[in-house]
Image (cartoon, rainbow, N blue to C red):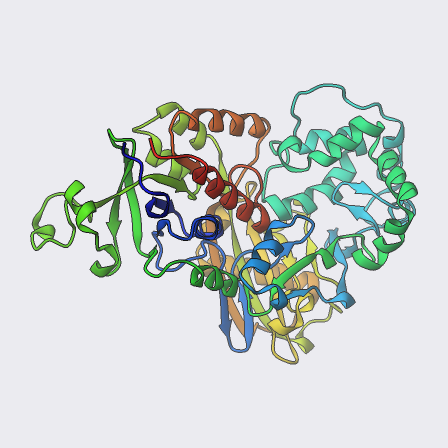
Amino acid sequence: MTDSPPLERRIAVIGGGISGLAAAHRLVELQPGCRLVLFEAASRLGGVLETIHEQGFQVEQSADNFITTVPWGVGLCKRIGMDDELIQTNPEHRKTFVVRSGRLCHLPDGFLMMAPTRLWPLAVTPILSPLGKFRAALEYFIRPRITDEDESMAAFVRRRLGREVFERLVEPLVSAVYAADMEKLSVEATLVQFREMELEHGSLIRAMRHRMKNRPKAATNLRSVHGDTGARYSMFVTPRHGLSSMVERIASCLPRDAVRLGARVERIERRADGRWGVFVMGQGGRESFSMSAEQSSDWRNPLSPTWKTTPDPFRGAEVFDALILATPSYEAARLLRPLDAELADKLAAIEHSGTAIVSVGYDRRQIAHPLDGMGVVIPAIENSPMLACSFSSQKYPHRAPEGKVLLRVFAGGAKRPELAEMEDGRLLPLVLGELGRLLGIRGEPCYTTIAHWPRTMPQYHVGHKKLVEEVRARVRGLPHIAFAGNAYQGVGIPHCIHSGQQAAEEILVTRPA
């Protein structure tokens, strides 16, 4: 028997973003005695989640909050003892703007992503032309598409609500979430609830009316909870001291010396005894890679005096009973290719886009617009370098000093990938010029920082759901390994947390071969 005693089981988590951290936390939560190692190639944990505090501004470098309509984000915060640090969005500014011909217009009250809960606001919005409104109203009478085939977001919305609703309302709202090409984005893998509404009620409008009619109390609360636009802002929360504080709290719950920073996993190997060898290229201090005598008997010890003179560039390898790959899918493909080329091909088929986030601070008096909302989304048809702009300090007032405003601009995405990696010196003038025109800004910002996140947003193209099922089927042929991350079943923070927790639970119900 090669089984390790349950409390001595060695498990590696590869990737220290929120998915990997959630996996690691769940492992020690369910099996406190397991011998956990978390490998992270960067010099810090958190992946894209990073909060910086400068000049009185609290700036999130990527996501800045998470939704509470699914339980996994808030649930983890409760278990790490920071649920009392979560704050909601500012109730005074729960509105969204949409750009139309260079002007900011309020999103119609009650318009939820791609379906109206109220018809009158849609009828009077200046965002749509009379013909566009008429076509949207016809949605009530259009028969549902009876098929099991997946469909692109663009095709679905044009079929149900018409071209103008798609271009002027749905495309900017969905692009702000997925940074995707709507002609390729899968309805089944992203907003399947709207497809289910179509099939169940024959119409999105009919489905919404049915829900409102049969849930009068919920409908009454909808306006007070959702705000004037119907966007579910009160259902979003963030840690008062930033998302980095959540990362730090999770890390503090892990065993001492479990985390290896600056440790890029170069390859993994399946051993004859059923365990896994993990080969690491180290960037950090040598002490981070110490091994037990048992491990060094299996693999060359990286602490030996001759280590630097050997031609092998790896800092050694460690042996584990199980692995969790919490890396981007293309990194998982790189590691798995020598073991299963077909699985690697499927993982590599998940494309990724990226964004650049330009955060700027201004004196409030420099901005003519009242900023009486949470932010603005910009349709692709407007030919803007911006996808969206979050009025960050309007959402959460503590993010800017008194008398100042913090704005966060998103640029890039699947349709403008060059912007995600554009040099700061070229990107900043583009963004500031557009921002100045939209909001009536005078003068230069008092604070600026830019974060580039290329290849961080997986694209759930048509057929994604089937592709993930095929990936999971292939993974079953590799015992004691699990996947986590945003490439599979959800891109938001709670879904990433859930994927990590599921991976940990899957690993713990299996025994070493």
Q: Residue at x 69, y 47 (%)?
A: 173
- Compared across the picture, whether 498 is left or right of 111 comes to left
Quarter the C terminus occupies: top left
Front-most of residues 504 and 69: 504
Q: Residue at x 92, y 42 (%)?
A: 213
Q: Residue at x 48, y 40 (%)?
A: 503
Front-most of residues 103 and 250: 250
* Percent position of residue 57, x then y: 56, 73
- As drawn, the residue found furthest toward the top would be 147
Number of on-image labels: 0
Front-most of residues 114 and 449: 114
* Percent position of residue 306, x then y: 7, 52
- Compared across the picture, whether 153 is left or right of 33 comes to right
Q: Is residue 141 visible?
A: yes
* Percent position of residue 400, x then y: 61, 74
Quarter the N terminus occupies: top left
Q: Residue at x 73, y 71 (%)?
A: 368
Looking at the picture, does residue 64 appear above or below residue 151? below
Looking at the picture, does residue 300 appear above or below residue 392? above
Q: Quadrant of residue 388?
A: bottom right
